[in-house]
Image (cartoon, coloured by chain):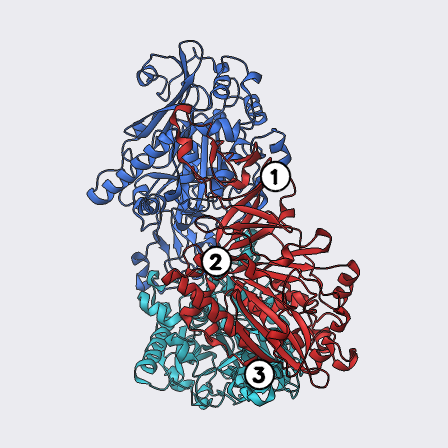
Chain colours: A blue, B red, C cyan
Amino acid sequence: MLRAEENQFITRVGPDAPMGRFMRRYWVPAMLSSELPKPDCPPVRVVLLGERLIAFRDSQGRVGLLDHLCPHRGASLFFARSEECGLRCVYHGWQFDVEGRCVDMPSEPPESNFKSKVRATAYPCRERGGVIWTYMGPGEPPPLPDLEANQLPEGESLVIAIQRDCNWLQALEGDIDTAHIGFLHFGANRAEDEIEGTFRYYTLKDRAPRYAVLDTEYGAMYGAYRPAGPGQLYWRIAQFLFPFYTMTPTGLLGHQVIARAWVPMDDEHTLLFTMVRQRDPQSREARMRQGGGPPALLPNTTDWYGRFRMVANEGNDYLMDRGRQERGEEYSGIELVHTQDQAITESMGPIYDRTREHLGSSDAMVIRVRRRLIACARAFEQEATAPPGADRPEVYRQRSGGAILDENADWIAATSELRQAYVTHPELDPAIVGGFV
Amino acid sequence: MLRAEENQFITRVGPDAPMGRFMRRYWVPAMLSSELPKPDCPPVRVVLLGERLIAFRDSQGRVGLLDHLCPHRGASLFFARSEECGLRCVYHGWQFDVEGRCVDMPSEPPESNFKSKVRATAYPCRERGGVIWTYMGPGEPPPLPDLEANQLPEGESLVIAIQRDCNWLQALEGDIDTAHIGFLHFGANRAEDEIEGTFRYYTLKDRAPRYAVLDTEYGAMYGAYRPAGPGQLYWRIAQFLFPFYTMTPTGLLGHQVIARAWVPMDDEHTLLFTMVRQRDPQSREARMRQGGGPPALLPNTTDWYGRFRMVANEGNDYLMDRGRQERGEEYSGIELVHTQDQAITESMGPIYDRTREHLGSSDAMVIRVRRRLIACARAFEQEATAPPGADRPEVYRQRSGGAILDENADWIAATSELRQAYVTHPELDPAIVGGFV
Amino acid sequence: MLRAEENQFITRVGPDAPMGRFMRRYWVPAMLSSELPKPDCPPVRVVLLGERLIAFRDSQGRVGLLDHLCPHRGASLFFARSEECGLRCVYHGWQFDVEGRCVDMPSEPPESNFKSKVRATAYPCRERGGVIWTYMGPGEPPPLPDLEANQLPEGESLVIAIQRDCNWLQALEGDIDTAHIGFLHFGANRAEDEIEGTFRYYTLKDRAPRYAVLDTEYGAMYGAYRPAGPGQLYWRIAQFLFPFYTMTPTGLLGHQVIARAWVPMDDEHTLLFTMVRQRDPQSREARMRQGGGPPALLPNTTDWYGRFRMVANEGNDYLMDRGRQERGEEYSGIELVHTQDQAITESMGPIYDRTREHLGSSDAMVIRVRRRLIACARAFEQEATAPPGADRPEVYRQRSGGAILDENADWIAATSELRQAYVTHPELDPAIVGGFV
């Protein structure tokens, strides 16, 4: 439970909100590279941290992200012409480059030199792993975070963006809560139908895992454990990384490479980027059959909120089928793991009121992450304490996943190597996972 | 005319509004029994007094009405599973019974005993006469009010629910205003075309009735009178009953059994329940031909505001036909009495601003009811005076309708027997009504 | 740039806003005469200066404009019957004439004499040149302004109304900004393709005109000049007239007769009336081919905002075609001059925030007009100084357009005769314009 002021503090991300200022010290995934497919292609409307921006790719292929209102008299740069290495407003022909410099002002007499005095708000952009990153804070941007899932070879990498119509935090909280797996996603599945000895088997056998939680220099980590074979525990280890990343415990620790960015578009809309290593298309198909694939999206439109919208959405109750729910074909009656999460977190309302909740022992990580976020954003606000990890890309070299450990093992020490990014473990057998879990 | 503060006071019904707290001391019709057709059928979204609730019928057929957000972390119970005598949230499997008790919490280790500490907001429900009633106030609920129209034998009873998109009070006020009948509903009809000596004939002959109004222990009553045969007056006698019921003067006093509940969904939406005795289908058809039947409804959807919406609505100007208006086929150009009322009261805006009105002598009952409501809600708020009738079901044993009385008769004394509920008057001839009026 | 308070002050037009009170001292174009085609035709919903009104034409052909809520109990007069020289509310039959007098009150006993005490809010109306004018201020209305374009012989006159979904001021500002012509409208056209010596040729040759600006008794005037033939300048002379009129410099000064009224419906919607002399249909066709014709409109509906809406609108990006933009078929990719202006001014948002802009030398007239509006509305508010021109119809006898002057000429003196309305100049050759510019 949070107090009303805390809930306000932690959820709001606009330029004047403390959490918004805190987030602006980090690089932010803004869009997919494929949204700007070639030089001088059509500009794209982007909402990010409560700001309305226009993204474009200039004649040299560089990406720019400008305030959508021309600094002259406020015409939207959505209608602008991307040409000659700049975005040219069609109202008076003023042209801005990716850094926001006014590089042409043909409506003014040349002697005025007014051009040098005008600058568009522009956020620096970088491209990596199919994602366009931007830095919306003051000063020189730090290096990009060392997120392994964003640095994979092209054939192994999958990046998916999906819009969620609620506040970023309640969306993210669903991702650091391993207890809901056994209900929302697999509530209708039975251990007896699975191969004994797999993660999936243990998950379905004991649906009330215990939690160990700790702070880290990049955020927080939990291990959720339950009985496995004799003298063994099955550990699901997952990460929260500042300011809005998760690494989920699905899959095998040491093998799985994943990062999810819960990027606030504004206080009531989130763009989730899932970056994941996927080695072969067959496993993707299997994953889909088990409900772990991506949901169908509507075609993108040019609207501010027209990107990566799901076909199954609030307006159609996420295509819930009460018959399938009743017959136990799906616990929720909603198809696909992602859609199930989307339905539940959006159903809490645009910004969930955390003064009304009742947290149990399985919410340990949710509680920890909120405390970390509030404490660090407050320290930054009040004492200018550096935002954790913002300037230290190497702390993001983390992995998540499941492992079978001896019941007396120190889970932190025992998994320290498996949690290191950029390392291969050919000795591991992914078959132990036993399906999507 | 009301002062701005009075208008605010009398119209707002949320949990923090004085009128909302006042109303919560009464039983409230929430939905039709037919909306929950069988045990463990799909839950229904219900908006009531500004609260968002989920209604369900458990495995034993009992009705529950829970806050729509799960007390755990706020997932909507709309997606929940109705099974094993409880509603089970699909997020973590927590299950609540119709009384709001958490009866299962499978995501927590059994030793935590957290289950006993969590309770969902639940409002007790009763079913009677096709209506599901709920009590949203504190403490033990009082008995249900003795509303005859809600206690009829099944074959004689008709209950219709229709949503109105405006504040409950302006909707209700149209129902205690007999003067509009001769204009909005029958403005294009002429006395000459009716059978002399019937109510309908007198109504059309004199369209400016005089009003007698008085306070009652259950609310207020008026008699509106106009000339009938020599030495006689035609009286239309109607009731307001706390907190939001009307009994209309249509039909014959002593014969007609009706109650209408103007239930606030929230400040800007009302669900009108019309409970009425209708003895034979033929009279229903005749009523329809004269414009007194129910309007066509859109199919219900699962939306918060998707229940009992009219086909004719604000978006299509209530299917008004200017040609029919001009030619006098209907005074308003809108078909059906109900639709005419809907159009007029919604056209005042979501919450009508009563500081701007000009009330005449025919608004005597409107004025009286407002004063009663404000005075009683204030007395309850400030001095804890018991809300009239809330604990006295017997005061609701009332009837309304028309009667021909000697011009010197004391209308109150002369009609006291006819106004008693649960009494038959075989001596009365309904034909005197002369049609729907 | 304006301070936030100034921007608030200058843009808001409701009955309680200073600028709203200022504007209410002037006659206001409310609708087209053709919207009320005959006596007792259907009433029309009209939003004007933030008020919701019902327009009707009575049995004698007089136009009335009443508050949309009946003064009795607030039923909308949209549903009223226009009959017997008045609008009759269908709720209780109360009838009001064009002056707001209650001329019938059949629901009240005749002896009450309540009728004489009730008055509807009614604004006096006048019809001239196809436009229905109204006066929403206190006291006796002044004479109508002497706007030549509104007083043309019927065959020569064209009046077009188009709704714009943004604040009136940013819409108007686009019309006193001649510099944008060479970009937004003709940015893709080249001087080389035009006939040398025409206005069009000079406009395309030098796209950064210099500005001379001065206050006038009716508002403000500018001359924007650029090189023409040897020793000559091409001047574009245009007017702002209180409180919301423009006369654009398109065409030939002394020949062109035009007035545009940027009438605020409310703070976020504007109804633009273009009144213009057009002598032959052929020139209209030529104008259309050059992008100067009116855009396609959706059929009017009965909604508050259903009148004169464009087919090309924000929801469809104004039917922008990126291919046509890229290939230079249109600079903006949007067809028609009007639609281009609509797109740009609406793209600034409902009410543009002028604290963020950067004005150049070509914004001289925009700056001047704002200063005039703020100063005069403040003087009226604080010192009761008469609103300029409100009581002096003759100051509106102005014209606008282009002229070639000797480079040493005093442009004001040299054009004084050409700027007088109601004068013919047979010596002028309109061909010098060289097309729509």
- State the CA–CA distance, disc 1 to disc 2: 27 Å
Q: Depth check: give the residue in front, C146 or B428.
A: B428
Q: Secondary structure at mark 2?
A: helix
* Relative to B48, A7 lies left or right: left
Label 3, on which residue? C64
Q: Depth check: give the residue in front, C308 or B408.
A: B408
- State the CA–CA distance, disc 1 to disc 3: 60 Å
Marks 2 & 3 on one chain:
no
- State the CA–CA distance, disc 2 to disc 3: 43 Å
Residue shown at 74%/74% (left/top)?
Answer: B329
| Tag 1: amino acid | Gly
Residue shown at 38%/78% (left/top)?
Answer: C407
Label 1, on which residue? B61
Q: Are marks 1 and 2 in contact (CB under 8 Å)?
A: no
Looking at the picture, how far across and down is residue B414, in whole percent? 64, 75
Q: Depth check: give the residue in front, C360 or C241.
A: C241
Looking at the picture, how far across and down is residue B356, in whole percent? 47, 76
Label 2, on which residue? B23
Q: Could you tell me which chain the residue with mark 1 belongs to?
A: B
Q: Depth check: give the residue in front, B393 or B183.
A: B393
